């Protein structure tokens, strides 16, 4: 069974700083990895999806990378803004169309 | 194309009552997933369904909980004889297959 870990559990940074969120998974036989954002009391919003054949995906200030061999994915946020404050979750899709979620990183960007 | 629709948004039940949570997937999506989230905790997988079939229910308690995704109509997560420990946010997600997951806004269940 796939185990997904996210470190750190919480992160506070001043506005404008670049930051990296980490996601580790135990089963390298991963089909894709998706990063989500969750605001308090809300559902999850998909940010980026990386296929197993890809190394990275970019959307605006966000860049996600995937290294299957080491079982790691990172989400890079450039020039952070207070509006980026949220919980960020990664989910790996393994065999059987099952998606395994990490416990998330709670990000606070301080104005 | 409307997103994943969940209703009700909030549901209050007394202990022993039944809770029925509904999820209409995005148009064209035949895969539905249900997750439960407790405060300050991550998403816990409950059940994965395709039209008229339960594919994986390994995350769902054996008693009191059931799920269905009929040929017509929304997916239903049913909790019988609710207890206070069932209070949580329940999220539904849909997918066209093996690609992206799209989430609904969730149903917040409160058991008094």
Image (cartoon, coloured by chain):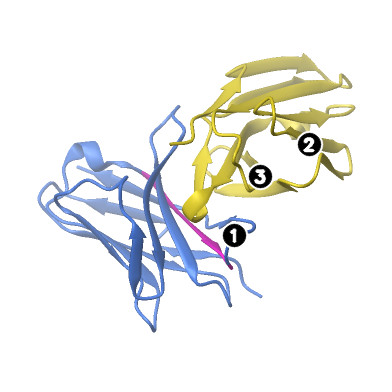
The residues bearing labels 3 and 1 have C-alpha atoms spaced at a distance of: 12 Å
Name which of mark 3 and mark 2 comes first in the sequence.
3
Identify the chain of the residue marked 1, using the numbered disc in the image. Answer: B
Residue on which disc 2 sits: A64
- Relative vertical location of residue B92 with respect to residue A62 in this rendering, above or below: below
Q: Which of A1 and A33 is in front in this view?
A: A1
Name the residue: 61% across, 37% down: A90
Identify the chain of the residue marked 2, using the numbered disc in the image. Answer: A
- Relative vertical location of residue A15 with respect to residue B35 in this rendering, above or below: above
What's the magenta bit mostly, secondary-structure-wise? strand
- Relative vertical location of residue B34 with respect to residue B43 in this rendering, above or below: below
Q: What element carries label 2?
A: strand
**As drawn, is B79 to the left or to the right of A1?**
left
Residue on which disc 1 sits: B98
| Residue at the bottom extreme, as displayed | B72
Q: What hue does chain B carry in this figure?
A: blue
* Residue B96 percent coordinates (x, y): 59, 68
Residue on which disc 3 sits: A34
> Dot 3: within a 10 Å radius of its alpha carbon, few (fewer than 14), some, or many (20 or more) residues?
many
* Residue B23 percent coordinates (x, y): 43, 66
What are the residue bounds of the magenta stretch? B89-96
């Amino acid at each position: 069974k796939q185990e997904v870990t996210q470190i750190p559990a919480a992160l506070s940074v001043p506005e404008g700083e670049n930051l990296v969120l980490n996601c580790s998974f135990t089963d390298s036989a991963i089909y894709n990895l998706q990063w989500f954002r969750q605001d308090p009391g809300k559902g999850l919003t998909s940010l980026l999806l990386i296929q197993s054949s890809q190394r990275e995906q970019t959307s605006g200030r966000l860049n996600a990378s995937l290294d299957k061999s080491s079982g790691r994915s990172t989400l890079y946020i450039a020039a952070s803004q207070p509006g980026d404050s949220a919980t960020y979750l990664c989910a790996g899709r393994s065999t059987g169309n099952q998606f395994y979620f990490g416990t998330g990183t709670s990000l606070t960007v301080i104005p | 194309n409307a997103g994943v629709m969940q209703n009700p948004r909030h549901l209050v039940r007394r202990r022993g009552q039944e809770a029925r949570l509904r999820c209409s997937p995005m148009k064209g999506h035949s895969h539905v997933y249900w997750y439960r989230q407790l405060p300050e905790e991550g998403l816990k997988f409950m059940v994965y369904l395709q039209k008229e079939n339960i594919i994986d229910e390994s995350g769902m308690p054996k008693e009191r909980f059931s799920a269905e995704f009929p040929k017509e109509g929304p997916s239903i997560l049913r909790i019988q004889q609710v207890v206070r420990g069932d209070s949580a946010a329940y999220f539904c997600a849909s997918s066209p297959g093996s690609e992206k997951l799209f989430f609904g806004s969730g149903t917040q269940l409160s058991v008094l």
